[in-house]
Amino acid sequence: MKIAETPRITLRHFTQDDLNALTAILADPFVMRFSLSGPKTLKQTQSLLENVLASYENQGRGLYAVVHKDDQKLIGYCGFLEQEIDGQREIEISYRLASAYWGKGLATEAAKAIRDYAFSQLGLTRLISIIEPENIRSIRVADKIGMRHEKDSRIRNLPVRIYAIHKSDVS
């Protein structure tokens, strides 16, 4: 099921057929450098994919496959994760792309499309991103979609920055 489309990418529901392509992306230590769990094995990616598929049913949202239109390849994910930050339930925009597609504005394109989908289709009024302070690329994406640094926090004893945007911030 298609969620959003931009000039260069399509965001759609994941399927079981995406397992191998997603595993290749999430097994890359470079891609997973700023992941709390590190690179994922096939078994870990299968578990993640099962959770994502269940989230569509249980929550009506989740992480979505990012497909590059030029070559029709799965290049990563962008979507929503439920998080608890300092005792507060939050909805995070999460994004991760294969490194071959970095530096082209595709993560920003995907995150902006997901932000707009959240506010216009899902009725959400606030979104966050949880970003390690050294993850300059993700900070740039958050800035470009209108998120602002709200506070610093800790997750699993790691320092993180919380970026946030409200529906009223988007014109």
Image (spheres, helix red, strand yellow):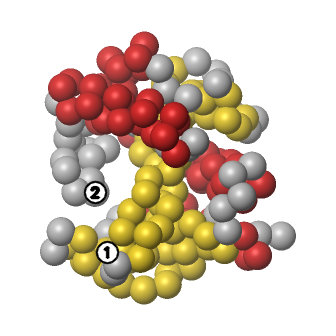
Q: Looking at the image, do the residues carrying marks 2 and 1 touch, with CB atoms under 8 Å apart?
A: no
- Residue bearing mark 1: 160
Image point 52% across, 36% down: which residue? 56
Marks 2 and 1 sit apart, C-alpha to C-alpha, by 11 Å
Residue lying at the far bottom in this picture: please name it.
151
Q: Quadrant of residue 44?
A: top left
Q: Position of residue 159 (x, y in %)?
A: 25, 77
The residue at 57%/66% (across/down) is 127
Q: Is residue 37 above or below residue 68?
A: below
The type of residue carrying mark 1 is: Val
Q: Which mark is residue 34?
A: 2
Q: Is residue 141 left or right of residue 32?
A: right
The disc placed on residue 48 is none
Disc 2 marks which amino acid?
Phe
Question: Residue lying furthest top in this view?
Answer: 17
Q: Residue at x 72, y 70 (%)?
A: 167
Rate crowding at label 2 as few (under 14), some (14 to 19) or many (20 or more) other CA atoms within 10 Å: some
Q: Name the spot of residue 66 as percent of width and height, x first.
A: 54, 33
Left or right: 127 as drawn, with respect to 84: right
